[in-house]
Amino acid sequence: MPNCDFFVPGNPGFVVEIDEKQHFAEPRLITLNLIPDGYKLGFDVNRWRQECLRVRAHDNDPPYRDEQRAWYDVLRDLMPPSRGMAGTVRIMDGSFPFCGIHPGDSAAVEAFKHLVVPVAGIQ
């Protein structure tokens, strides 16, 4: 399993991935379309499909980079639930100021929890 952006331990634990624009390429759309309906994901797969169609990112350095990124992303989507974890949470870069969250700022921490926890399907 490739490294992930964040792992949140717990029962169940879950993975959080931050997707920048380069994650929204045609190979990623292909992998998203192959995920079985009803598979436990912590993000809105239809929204990600739409974003792939809108952004149409290309990263050809090296020439297989889009395909490689799509492969690693789908592994991070499918592996955690297959091991009893909650669905992988994906956040579109720029959709939440997560880098500015300070652990001592309880309002910011709660806002982040409300973004992540319901989507991950955990309590």
Image: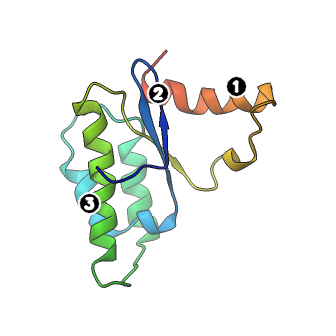
Residue under numbered circle 3: 71
Horizontal placement of 12 versus 114: left or right? left
Please tell me which residue lies in front, 92 or 100: 100
Residue under numbered circle 1: 110
Q: Amino acid type of disc 3?
A: Trp
Q: Is residue 13 depicted above or below 71 in this figure?
A: above
Horizontal placement of 38 versus 95: left or right? left
Q: Earlier in the sequence, mark 3 or mark 2?
A: 2
Label 2: how many Cα within 10 Å (few below 14, some 14–19, many 20+): few
Q: Amino acid type of disc 1?
A: Glu
Residue 50 falls in which quadrant of the image? bottom left
Look at the image and tell me whether residue 61 can be seen.
yes
Classify mark 3: helix, strand or loop.
Answer: helix
Q: Is residue 109 depicted above or below 95 in this figure?
A: above
**Mark 3 to mark 1 CA distance (whole Å):** 32 Å
**Mark 1 to mark 2 CA distance (whole Å):** 17 Å
| Residue 9: assigned label | 2
